[in-house]
Image: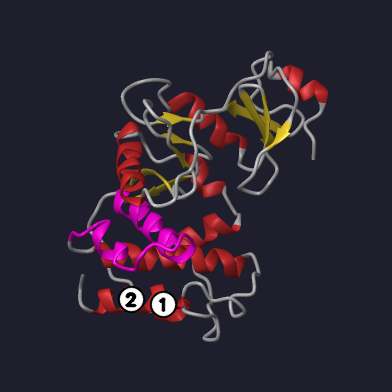
Amino acid sequence: MHPPRHVIEAFGAVGLPVRLDGGRGTAWRVGDTVLKPLDVLPAELEWLRDHAPSGGSGPRLSLPLASTSGDLVVDGWTACPALAGEHVPGRWAEIAEVARRFAEVFDGVARPGFLDERTHAWARADRLAWGEEAVHVPDDVPHLPALLAARRPVAESPTVVHGDLTGNVLFADGLPPAVVDLTLYWRPVRYSVAVVAVDAVCFEAAPSSLLETIDPGDGSAQHLVRALVFRIATDWFNELPLDTHDVYAATVGRVLDLAARGR
């Protein structure tokens, strides 16, 4: 859906709308501004406005923009700055470092209240991964029963992390990495890194050895287990056909082996 003219004007954007690739295909660039339909809770935008720094030495963040009237949502549309850079497959170690630096940006903040209000598939899958939502998982759902049985407690403390970094870090020469589509969770930083590893191996043809090298410390397998539960359960909750094109099987086998060996 094309952003209406009055929405473009309300956010002070100047230029012709150009549809952007990636994501859900609903974002449009208008000059230096990206407009897209609201796909998070308004409380998430408000939290970012109130808690995210606008500068500093960390990664560049695509934070919500206010309209000329001060609103963060105009007739169902939101806006954020268009940040320079592009996604570069293969820079997974650098993206893992961005995950750590992103968490440092929010170090010391309290757990956001909006997390308890989210009901979409991604939020439910995250809670299932961490044992916070009771869901009956039938035995015939691919991989989930085995992964859930492999979970063991983790020691790391939670903080605000980005839960979907793999395709949402942009690189530009001479600039810090940029982070877009700020998808926040309250989890250990190593979980955010594990999601990057699982995504890279399953969807970007990364070598399976990345599962061990991206976070070589003890206990990494438990975060990989939860990252796989998160991705597979999201597909399941969204009623995607898990058994017709199984991109997870080899990675699940590798991660279950790591977990069994106590890695």
Confirm whether the magenta stretch covers residue 211: yes
Which disc number belongs to residue 254? 2
**Would residue 78 be found to the left or right of residue 195 on screen?**
right
Q: Are marks 1 and 2 in contact (CB under 8 Å)?
A: yes
**Would residue 97 be found to the left or right of residue 46 on screen?**
left
Residue placed at 40% from the left, 41% from the top? 111
Q: Badge 2: few (under 14), some or many (20 or more) residues near its Cα, within 10 Å?
A: some
Amino acid bearing label 2: Arg
Which disc number belongs to residue 1? none
Confirm whether the magenta stretch covers residue 203: yes
State the extent of the magenta-drawn residues as a range. 189-217
Q: Secondary structure at mark 2?
A: helix
Q: Position of residue 190 (x, y in %)?
A: 30, 53
Q: Furthest-left residue in view?
A: 218
Is residue 216 visible in the rendered structure shown here?
A: yes
Q: Which residue is mark 1?
A: 250
- Residue 178, relative to residue 259: is it above or below? above
Total number of numbered discs in the rendering: 2
Look at the image and name its color scheme.
secondary structure
Residue placed at 66% from the left, 69% from the top? 239
| Residue nearest the observer in this picture, 10 or 98 | 98
Q: Secondary structure at mark 1?
A: helix
Location of residue 71 (image quadrant): top right
Q: Position of residue 126 (x, y in %)?
A: 47, 59
| Residue nearest the observer in this picture, 133 or 81 | 81
Q: Position of residue 56 (x, y in %)?
A: 33, 21
Q: Furthest-bottom residue in view?
A: 139
